[in-house]
Image (cartoon, grey):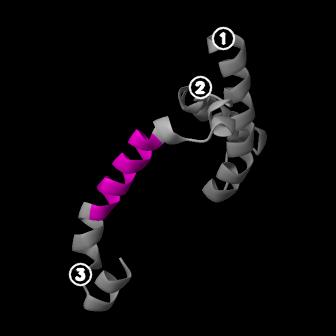
Amino acid sequence: MVAATFCGVLGYVASVALPCVVLLLIYSGDYMPKSVKLLGDISYEMYLVGFPIQQAIISLFGGNMNPYLNMVIAIPIDIVIGYLIYKIVNHKK
């Protein structure tokens, strides 16, 4: 990527390299450390509650809010609620 930047072909290289990196991260899940696997996969739960959390925060701020501020506030809340839903509903032990 660094060499592509200097050669002026970053856009072309990134269009091939970025999907490869994403696929690598997706399929490397089997090799994640045990401490990370213990947390579980909360991504779906975060997906389910993310939009309602963002809308509730916007509503609390009077309906007009900077999107970056919304992300800073919503993401930690989303992670906690997603984790709780995962542990309560989906975790079968």
User: Considering only vertical position in the picture, is 39 above or below 85?
Assistant: below
Give the number of marks. 3
* Secondary structure that dominates the magenta span: helix
Kind of residue at badge 2: Glu
What residue is shown at x 55% (from left), y 41% (from top)? 32
Residue 89's disc is 1
Task: Assess whether residue 18 is covered by the magenta stretch.
Answer: yes
* 80 or 72, nearer to the observer: 80
Assess disc 2: are there few (<14), some (14-19) or many (≥20) residues with their C-alpha within 10 Å of its C-alpha.
Answer: some
**Is 62 in the magenta?**
no
At 27% from the left edge and 73% from the top edge, which residue is drawn? 11
Q: Position of residue 10 (x, y in %)?
A: 29, 78
Q: CA distance from mark 1 to mark 2?
A: 10 Å
Q: Point out the stretch of residues depicted in magenta.
A: 17-28
**Residue type for callout 3:** Val
What's the residue at 71%, 18% (across, down)? 87
Query: 44 and 3: which one is in front?
Result: 3
Q: Position of residue 3 (x, y in %)?
A: 32, 85
Image spot of residue 24 (x, y percent)? 38, 49
Q: Secondary structure at mark 3?
A: loop
Disc on the earlier residue, 3 or 1: 3
Q: Please tell me the numbered disc located at residue 9.
A: 3
Residue at position x 34%, y 47% from top? 23
Picture quarter containing residue 27?
A: top left
